[in-house]
Image (cartoon, rainbow, N blue to C red):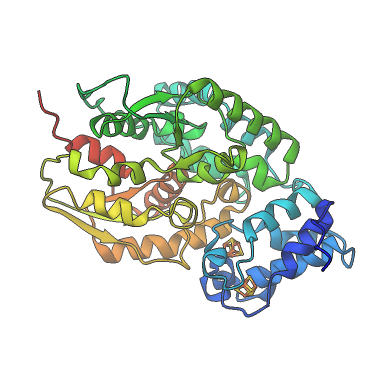
Amino acid sequence: MALEKPPHTRKQKIASLADQCVQCGLCLPTCPTYGLDGNEAESPRGRIAIAAALARGDAEPTEALRIHLDHCLGCLNCQRVCPANVKYDELLVETRALIGPSPRRPKQLLAMLKQPSLLRLAARVGGSTGLAHWKQRLADRLPATSAWRSALETWSEPAHVAAPPVPKNQHADQPAVALFPGCVASVEDEAAERAAITLLQAAGYRVERLPAFCCGAMDLHGGDMDTADRLAERVRDSWQRSGATQLISVTPGCLGTLRRALPDVTVSDPVTLLAERRDRLVFRPLERRVAVHLPCTQLNVARSESALQDLLRQVPSLDLAMLPRPPHCCGAAGSHMLEFPERAARLREGVLGQIARLAPQQLLSSNIGCRLHLAAGMDKQGEQWPTMHPLTLLAQQLEISP
Ligand code: SF4
Ligand code: SF4
């Protein structure tokens, strides 16, 4: 029997991936953009058909056609429920690479967001000029569709959270974990990074922090494969110097890209490692009702939702209120909230409504992009739920023996 040849070109690969779809439609009810528009072209099945037509030369990548691919949030709810195991993530990345970056992409803004040193400088300038108090007046001068307007509205001063104490059980023979700080998260979510280090050390891991730079997720998902490949090479180089046995990222949004760069390495959410050793962690009680938002990448890439709940339940008196599962997506989705602010705001409204019904005192979410986007929506609606990474809360409650 003749063996089927693997596809050689990008177009063949896309066509072959699209052929796996049996068009059953089971993914449609889980797709947030299908829920928003009720339009087949805004569904996973519709996007797969568009990708196949582009790859086979049956259609041209006109603006009218590519907009449906650009609207995709990459949430992967569809992939999770697909009975035919269609690799939608791969299909989307390859198709966006085939048609190239969207002319709508805010290149300068994204280039700035990818540089931690520039972000730190912007945070310092924003903090010293009280930007939080006048950013909306400045934003209102920009067009509603402007990516810069959306970025301004989302801007927030990085939270100053006291550094948790360092556990005293560090030994050279403990398993070594490398922490990938990322770009935006390394500045805006430094507290979560420090929390992860403290918790992992308390659980008996040695942690090595890698240099902070972008993993390439926004380029990979934006069709700029050359830049994504260069950043993947930097990830590999940085990993090889670490001497660690596994890699973690406190932001689940980076995990898929890191796994692509390092297919033979275990790349996980620190929550998974911590849950495995939760018998080593003791937490002080906290009487607080917290709403837990699970970012799409935590559900569909990290798959760490149960581990997160197991860990949070270790905190005595903490009242957990979980947000409903997909098809809900807050609309942040990497650069989606910058490129399509109006759609992102509509998606966010649904999630803010769910949070309001849970009547929490605080909101937890592992993804800094989701937290900033949700917080910007709260500002507009006058809501006051302080937001935090779940690891930051866990580290604050950690009991460390003297
Ligand atoms: S569930 Fe899978 S096979 Fe069915 S339409 Fe969606 S992508 Fe295609
Ligand atoms: S990744 Fe999300 S938004 Fe995109 S088609 Fe799948 S379910 Fe819809």
Query: Left or right of 48: which side holds 273?
Result: left
Residue appearing at x 83%, y 56% in the figure? 11
Can you tell which quarter of the image residue 42 is in? bottom right
Residue appearing at x 73%, y 52% in the figure? 94
Query: Left or right of 35: which side holds 14?
Result: right
Query: Left or right of 191: which side holds 55?
Result: right
Question: Who is closer to the viewer here, 135 or 54?
Answer: 54
**67 up-or-down from 26: above or below:** above
Residue appearing at x 56%, y 40% in the figure? 264
Measured as percent of width and height from the top left, residue 41 is found at 70, 71
Visible in this render: residue 74?
yes
Residue appearing at x 25%, y 53% in the figure? 310
- Ligand 2 positioned in quadrant: bottom right
Measured as percent of width and height from the top left, residue 105 is found at 70, 44
Can you tell which quarter of the image residue 389 is in? top left
Question: Who is closer to the viewer here, 234 or 54?
Answer: 234
Measured as percent of width and height from the top left, residue 16 is found at 77, 63
Q: Quadrant of the C terminus?
A: top left
Visible in this render: residue 384?
no
Measured as percent of width and height from the top left, residue 294 is found at 39, 55
